[in-house]
Image (spheres, rainbow, N blue to C red):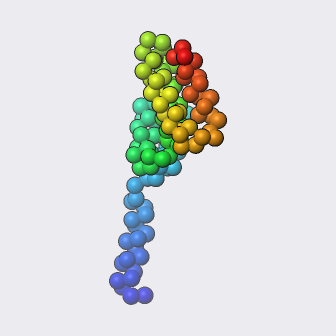
């Protein structure tokens, strides 16, 4: 094989190792952090996934889940803003995936907490 071709092949192989994580990978990391109850780090992973792919419904759903969890911990007075933010995330999921029953259910739970 031509030495130049070898170098190009090596560069291609190496670039895939150093490539930025995909939205799916970031969502997987966020979901793992959600299970570990690491809310701030979890939220950051889902935000990064949305930055990588603004149409990633999974990222919006995860962000809504972590925001809802934080709102429940904050209680009624401080949780209102978080519940409203979670509603926005779940609404975005519904916009992207109109058949996503879990997003409708989660949004309804937020509305109930908001007294709507």
What residue is drawn where x is 57% and y is 18%? Answer: 112
Q: Is residue 17 above or below residue 37?
A: below
What residue is drawn where x is 37% and y is 71%? Answer: 11
What residue is drawn where x is 44% and y is 11%? Answer: 77
- Seen in the image, is 42 located left or right of residue 111? left
Give how far across and how far down residue 109 sits, in percent. Answer: 59, 23
Outermost residue, top side: 77
Quarter of the image with the N terminus in it: bottom left
- How many numbered marks have been drawn onto this rendered protein structure? 0
Q: Is residue 13 above or below residue 109?
A: below
Q: Depth check: 77 or 107 in front?
A: 107
What residue is drawn where x is 40% and y is 59%? Answer: 19
The answer to whether residue 33 shows anywhere in this view is no
Outermost residue, bottom side: 2
Q: Is residue 21 above or below residue 46?
A: below
Q: Depth check: 89 or 35 in front?
A: 89
Quarter of the image with the C terminus in it: top right
Give how far across and how far down residue 15 sits, in percent. Answer: 39, 65
Give how far across and how far down residue 66 sits, in percent. Answer: 50, 30
- Seen in the image, is 28 located left or right of residue 16? right
Q: Depth check: 19 or 105 in front?
A: 105
Q: Depth check: 14 or 47 in front?
A: 47
The answer to whether residue 11 shows anywhere in this view is yes
């Amino acid at each position: 094989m031509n030495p130049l071709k070898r170098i190009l092949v090596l560069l291609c192989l190496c670039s895939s190792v150093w490539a930025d994580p995909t939205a799916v990978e970031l969502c997987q990391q966020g979901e793992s952090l959600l299970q570990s109850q690491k809310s701030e780090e979890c939220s950051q992973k889902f935000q990064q996934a949305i930055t990588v792919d603004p149409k990633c419904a999974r990222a919006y759903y995860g962000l809504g889940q972590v925001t809802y969890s934080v709102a429940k911990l904050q209680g009624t007075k401080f949780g209102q803003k978080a519940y409203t933010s979670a509603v926005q995330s779940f609404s975005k999921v519904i916009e992207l995936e109109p058949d996503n029953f879990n997003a409708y259910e989660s949004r309804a739970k937020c509305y109930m907490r908001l007294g709507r």
